C-alpha cells in the first residue's frame, strides 16, 4: 500500500499557499431594473443589513421595495455606468491587481490576492472554493470597509463562514475587522486631499461624508460611529486643520427610522444657506468610488449645494487603485500575515 493517498486534484508545488481575500460590497451586473432587482433581492435579504423579523420584512421587501426601488436605482446607476461597466467593480479589480503587485514585490510571490463581492459576482463562496482548488491553505480576509459595522464587515465574515462550511478541509482563516486608524490608510487619505488642494485649491470647508447606519445598530454595539469620528480626528490632525475647518456627516439613509446624524444632505444645504461658497467633500469610508460617491455625492448633493447658494462644490475621489492605497493595504496585510509567510 502507498504511504500517502494522492489528493483528488494535484496543484503545482510552487503555487501560493497563502491568500489575501479583498471583499467589497458588490454591484449589479448592469444598470437595468432587472439586474438591480436581482442585486437588491440578495442585499436586502441579508439579516445583517435589515435587522427585522422575516415575517415583518418579507412582505415589505417583495410586495413593495423590489417592485418600486429597482427602477429608480437603475436610473441612478445609469448616470455613473462606464463603457467598461460598474465603477465599483472596475476600481475594486484595479485595486486588487495593485495590491497583488505590491505583495508580490515584498513576498517574492508567496501570497496571492483575490477579490470577492458580498453580493453579486464574484461571490465570496465561489472565490474561496476557487482558492481552495488552487491549493491555498491560509486565507486572510480583508474587507474593504475601514470602519467596522455588522452590516458590512460582519456580513462578509458570515459569508466566509458559510463558504468554509462547504469545505471538507477548510483553510486556516484570519480576518481584519477594521483599519479606521491605520497609519498607512490615514496617510493615503491625507496625501489625496493635499494633492487635490495643490491642483484645485482649497475650499472654505472640508466635509467628510461616511455611509449612514441606523442608530439602533450603534446602540446594539457597532463601533462604527466612534470609528468614523476617530478617522476624522486623525485626518484633521494630519492635515493641520482647525476644528471649524472640517465637518463630519452621514449619507445614504433609507426608511423612516433614525440614522446616525448629522445627515449629509441636510449639512450641505445648511452650509450653503449659511454663506459657505466653496465646499470639498471626501468619503473616507469608501475604499473605491461607487454609486454613493459618484451619483449621490458628486452629482445629486453638488446640485443641492449650488441651488442653495453655493458656488463651487468639489468631490475628492476615493483612494481607488492609487499607489498609496495599494501600499497601505499591502502593509496592513503583511502585518496580519505574520507567522504565515
Image (cartoon, grey):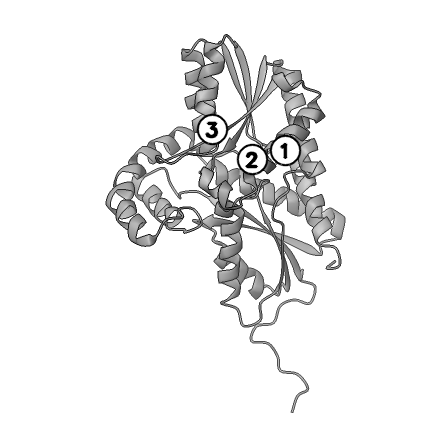
Q: Quadrant of residue 258?
A: top left
The residue located at (46%, 32%) in the rendering is: 292
Of the 4 image quadrants, the one containing the C terminus is bottom right
Badge 2 or badge 3: first in the primary sequence: 2
Residue drawn 52% across the image and 58% down it: 160
How far is mark 2 from mark 1, CA to CA? 9 Å
Q: Position of residue 283 (x, y in %)?
A: 55, 30
Q: Which mark is residue 294?
A: 3
Q: Are marks 2 and 1 in contact (CB under 8 Å)?
A: yes
Residue 302's spot in the image, x, y percent? 45, 19
Front-most of 16 and 265?
A: 265
On the picture, is 77 further left or further right than 133?
A: left
Q: Earlier in the sequence, mark 2 or mark 1?
A: 1
Of mark 3 and mark 1, the one earlier in the sequence is: 1
Foreground mark, 2 or 1, reads: 1
Q: Secondary structure at mark 2?
A: loop
Query: Vertical placement of 271 versus 23: above or below?
Result: above
Q: Is residue 52 left or right of residue 271?
A: left
The image quarter in which residue 146 lies: top right
Please state the horizontal and vertical placement of residue 98, each as a whole percent of the image.
64, 42
Q: Residues within 10 Å of mark 1 (few under 14, many from 20)?
A: many
Q: Secondary structure at mark 3?
A: helix
Q: Residue 285: which disc?
A: 2
Residue at 30% from the left image edge and 43% from the top image edge: 34
- Alpha carbon distance from label 3 to label 1: 22 Å
Q: Mark 1 sits on what residue?
A: 231
Amino acid at each position: 500500500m502507498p504511504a500517502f493517498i494522492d489528493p483528488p486534484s494535484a496543484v503545482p508545488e510552487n503555487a501560493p499557499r497563502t491568500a489575501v481575500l479583498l471583499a467589497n460590497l458588490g454591484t449589479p451586473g448592469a444598470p437595468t431594473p432587472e439586474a438591480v432587482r436581482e442585486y437588491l433581492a440578495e442585499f436586502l435579504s441579508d439579516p445583517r443589513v435589515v435587522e427585522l423579523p422575516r415575517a415583518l420584512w418579507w412582505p415589505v421587501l417583495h410586495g413593495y421595495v423590489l417592485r418600486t426601488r429597482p427602477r429608480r436605482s437603475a436610473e441612478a446607476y445609469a448616470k455613473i455606468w462606464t463603457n467598461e461597466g460598474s465603477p465599483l467593480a472596475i476600481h475594486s479589480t484595479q485595486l486588487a491587481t495593485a495590491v497583488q503587485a505590491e505583495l508580490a514585490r515584498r513576498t517574492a510571490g508567496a501570497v496571492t490576492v483575490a477579490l470577492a463581492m458580498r453580493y453579486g459576482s464574484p461571490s465570496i463562496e465561489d472565490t474561496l472554493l476557487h482558492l481552495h482548488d488552487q491549493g491555498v491553505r491560509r486565507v486572510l480576509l480583508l474587507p474593504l470597509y475601514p470602519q467596522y459595522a455588522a452590516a458590512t464587515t460582519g456580513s462578509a465574515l458570515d459569508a466566509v463562514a458559510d463558504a468554509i462550511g462547504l469545505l471538507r478541509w477548510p483553510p486556516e482563516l484570519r480576518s481584519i475587522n477594521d483599519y479606521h486608524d491605520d497609519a498607512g490608510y490615514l496617510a493615503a487619505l491625507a496625501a489625496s486631499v493635499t494633492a487635490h488642494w495643490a491642483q484645485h485649491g482649497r475650499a472654505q470647508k472640508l466635509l467628510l461624508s461616511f455611509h449612514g447606519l441606523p442608530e439602533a445598530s450603534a446602540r446594539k454595539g457597532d463601533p462604527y460611529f466612534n470609528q468614523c469620528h476617530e478617522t476624522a480626528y486623525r485626518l484633521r490632525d494630519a492635515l493641520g486643520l482647525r476644528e471649524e475647518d472640517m465637518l463630519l456627516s452621514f449619507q445614504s439613509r433609507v426608511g423612516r427610522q433614525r440614522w446616525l446624524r448629522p445627515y449629509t444632505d441636510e449639512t450641505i444645504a445648511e452650509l450653503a444657506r449659511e454663506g459657505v461658497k466653496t465646499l470639498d467633500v471626501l468619503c473616507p469610508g469608501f475604499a473605491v468610488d461607487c454609486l454613493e460617491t459618484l451619483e449621490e455625492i458628486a452629482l445629486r448633493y453638488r446640485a443641492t449645494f449650488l441651488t442653495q447658494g453655493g458656488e463651487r462644490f468639489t468631490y475628492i475621489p476615493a483612494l481607488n487603485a492609487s499607489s498609496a492605497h495599494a501600499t497601505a493595504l499591502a502593509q496592513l496585510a503583511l502585518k496580519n500575515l505574520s507567522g504565515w509567510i
